[in-house]
Amino acid sequence: MKITIQFGGGVHLLFGNIKLHEIDLPDREKHWTIGDLLLWMTDNLLQERPELFLQDKSVRPGILVIVNDTDWELLGCADYVIQPKDTIGFISTLHGG
Amino acid sequence: MPSCSAKCGRNAILKRPKTSDVLCKECFFEAFENEVHFTITRAKLFTPNTTVAIAASGGKDSTVLAYVLKLLNEKYDYRLKLLLLSIDEGITGYRDDSLDTVKQNRDDYEMSLKILSYKDLYGWTMDEIVAEIGRKNNCTFCGVFRRQALDRGANLLKVDYLATGHNADDIAETVLMNILRGDLARLSRCTSIITDSGDGIPRVKPLKYCYEKEIVMYAYFRKLVYFSTECVFAPNAYRGHARVLLKDLEKIDPTVIMNIIHSGETMKVSETSKMPKLTNCTRCGYVSSQEICKACVLLEGLNKGLPRLGIGKSSKVKRLLKENEEKNKSSGICRGEEDKTCLCSGTDSMKPVKINELVLKELRI
């Protein structure tokens, strides 16, 4: 399943400094939730300091998740079932000026 | 997908942490901007026909502040002249990049921009300071110097107000930090929306009640360009601990942020507690609660090769300075400028630049 991942607010620093990733999630019988995606990203994309991205099987507080330009809090957060061609953005609020 | 709480018929795009309302993009913009306008008018932050310097770092808060102030100034006819003021701390790979973003803001928002550097003001860049002090207490230097630098810049530009991008999360964090440190003087003034640095220019915080999440969402949906690499020195800052604690609490209940600010605002310091009185630094003239301001003490330490001098309690500094002064007087061991162990006031070259000595010729916009 092909989806797009975007990083903003400095999160890209943890992912090899790349802000846009076009990824192809492996086919499987069970659907993919964002919770599953987070673990997949940690294993396959994350380059450093996982504790700055993942906490208690969700994103670290202070990282906003936006699915197709909608706050994931409206979509069930980590339980949201990913659809083909979704664009999922991770934006950190933590980096100051 | 839920529809907008404002009953406009459109689909919601975010959940507001402050109210739990779910709003569409247009209603969110309107709510966010109206709340800043309400904050400004209720606290009477600005009077018409004045000049406001926006402290601009290129980060999300100051970028949103500049955008919203420009928008409200035009929409509600505040009749303010807005300009941008940036401080270049001299941090390679951080500030030099973020200043490019500020220059972008300058062009996008058609405001003039003034950049002041630590090197100009204090003779030291943050890179040089970190080389002396290490990475543990460097944020103390940066914070103390930046605060003065902004005030000095505002003075130079002869503006009427200095607006900073402090948001609700920042203020709640500061309240927590001041409680953790037992710093009553700062605790009692850190929630004020207008602070007056003595004879200085009022500092105002128009985004005081804006959640960090909403600021980031606002910038995202308005497609504002901001800079977001973390400060290369920040990971060890004490503030980081307060921030993590606050973010964990916010996850349980986002209203804790407003509640902490509310507590800070309404807390009253007991009349019997001893509070420092504000006076002017005997060296540089800057407003200070001590005879010698923190920036001068930190600078003195740096210039004498004792960078840890200003770290910790002011009583320790006073004692050290006094001891050394007496010792040197009686023994005559001070060898002047080369003497790295002597803490006497030394030569004039060791004092920071006074505002009136900062020659305007190079610094004018």
Image (tube, rainbow, N blue to C red):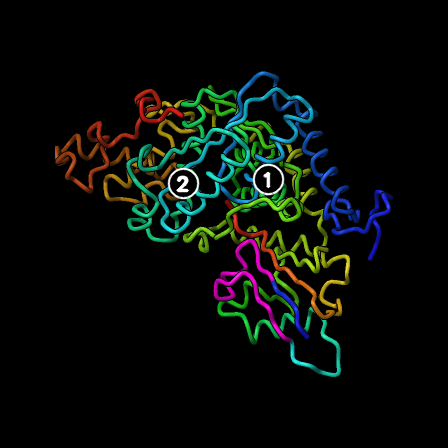
**Position of B299 compared to B51: left or right?**
left
Asked whether A13 falls inside the magenta stretch, the response is yes
Gap in Å between the C-alphas at discs 1 and 2?
A: 36 Å
Provide the secondary structure element on which disc 1 rests.
helix
**What is the three-letter code of the residue carrying label 2?**
Lys
Which circle, 1 or 2, is nearer the viewer? 1
Residue A3 horizontal/vertical position (percent): 66, 69
Q: Which residue is tagged 1?
A: B64
Asked whether A4 falls inside the magenta stretch, the response is no
Other-residue count near label 1 (Cα within 10 Å), few / some / many at <14 / 14–19 / ≥20: many
Residue found at x 36% / y 22%: B285
Residue found at x 48% / y 25%: B197
Whether residue B275 is visible, yes or no, is: no
Residue B349 horizontal/vertical position (percent): 22, 30
Residue B90 horizontal/vertical position (percent): 35, 43
- State the extent of the magenta-drawn residues as a range: A6-24
Whether residue B157 is visible, yes or no, is: yes
Chain on which label 1 sits: B
